[in-house]
């Protein structure tokens, strides 16, 4: 099965109104393949969600960076899934390592959040990944399997889940897993899905990579069989233009039909801006 390539940009806790307007303007001018070739989702801070949604081109989508585990109420500072749906926000990132580590979100709590967001009609980018200590101890797969199991325990339908493997030791550090290291974990995750969620889930679920992805390393990463895209952190605060490196470009030449067995490979060109990047 050919899985549509996915590129997500997580802006984290960065930006001002003017900076956000500037980066959206650049994205709106970018030449990209059509929606049936690549799915692009940007994730600004909560306060900028309505602004970005109102300005962003229609073939790009918007994600929130988190949402609460149940219906709203007396939960000061939280944002409910219902609020995101009311705003017309289709995606949400859940289980990011910064929330797992800094805010002590457990595997079970993340699993509950994923299940509730899906039940409200949101699509979920669900993050998993190990720390450096866990990798060096040889427990990478045990860690990511346990994180994924907590989701599988609460979810039967994976149609609206993108699984993001983000090794914690590579997030915002400038370090990056080698293509072979990333492919190894992605392949093992797909085998885990096959054994625990079924053949269809394993073949159709997109597993994307995050961890200091940039315009230099994404080309080799994207060539790996089981890497279906990226969740870009710091580099997404610069302007990235997505384009196919395959020639000729099938979305421009209607007489050239892309082979269904070909993997679409995408890379990013980075254009510097004055966006105030903080990781």
Image (cartoon, helix red, strand yellow):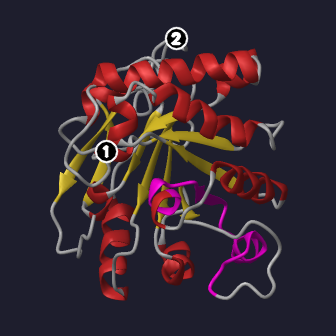
Q: Secondary structure at mark 1?
A: helix
Residue 125: percent from the left, percent from the top? Answer: 58, 49
Picture coordinates of residue 117, whole percent (x, y): 75, 59
**Which stretch did the figure color magenta?**
77-100
> Could you say which disc has been placed on residue 40 in the image?
none
Residue occupying the point 60% across, 41% down: 162
Residue 36: % across, % down: 57, 37
User: What's the residue at 36%, 32% (across, down)?
Assistant: 135
Q: Is residue 122 magenta?
A: no
Give the residue number, with chain letter if any, for mark 2.
261
- Mark 2 element type: loop
Q: Nearer the viewer, residue 264 or 206?
A: 206
* Residue 149 placement, left or right of 39: right
User: Which mark's residue is nearer the viewer, 2 or 1?
Assistant: 1
Report whether residue 2 is seen. Answer: no
Q: CA distance from mark 2 to mark 1?
A: 34 Å
Please name whichever residue, 140 or 72, is drawn nearer the observer in this view of the structure. 140
Residue at 48%, 30% in the rendered image: 228
Q: Quadrant of residue 170?
A: top left
How crowded pointer 2 is (Cα within 10 Å; few <14, some 14-19, many 20+) is rated as few
**Is 124 located above or below residue 35 in the figure?**
below
Identify the residue position indicated by label 1 in the image. 169
Q: Residue at x 78, y 52 (%)?
A: 115
């Amino acid at each position: 099965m050919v899985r549509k390539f996915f590129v997500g940009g997580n802006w984290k806790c960065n930006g001002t109104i003017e900076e956000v307007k500037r980066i959206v303007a650049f994205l709106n001018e970018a030449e990209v393949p059509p929606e049936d070739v690549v799915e692009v989702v940007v994730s600004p801070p909560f306060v900028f969600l309505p602004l970005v949604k109102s300005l962003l081109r229609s073939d790009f989508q918007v994600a929130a960076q988190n949402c609460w585990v149940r219906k709203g109420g007396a939960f000061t500072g939280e944002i409910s899934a219902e609020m995101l749906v009311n705003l017309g926000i289709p995606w949400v990132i859940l289980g990011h390592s910064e929330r797992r580590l800094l805010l002590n979100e457990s595997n079970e709590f993340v699993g509950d959040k994923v299940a509730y967001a899906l039940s409200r009609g949101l699509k979920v980018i669900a993050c998993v990944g190990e720390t450096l200590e866990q990798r060096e101890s040889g427990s990478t797969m045990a860690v990511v399997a346990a994180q994924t199991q907590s989701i599988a325990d609460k979810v039967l339908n994976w149609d609206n889940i993108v699984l993001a493997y983000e090794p914690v030791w590579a997030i915002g550090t400038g370090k990056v897993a080698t293509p072979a290291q990333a492919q190894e974990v992605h392949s093992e995750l797909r085998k885990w899905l096959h054994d625990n969620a079924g053949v269809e889930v394993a073949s159709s679920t997109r597993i994307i990579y995050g961890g200091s992805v940039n315009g230099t390393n994404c080309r080799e990463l994207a060539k790996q069989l089981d890497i279906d895209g990226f969740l870009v952190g710091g580099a997404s605060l610069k302007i990235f233009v997505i384009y196919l490196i395959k020639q000729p470009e099938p979305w421009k030449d209607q007489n050239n039909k892309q082979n269904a067995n070909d993997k679409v490979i995408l890379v990013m060109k980075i254009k510097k801006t004055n966006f105030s990047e903080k990781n």
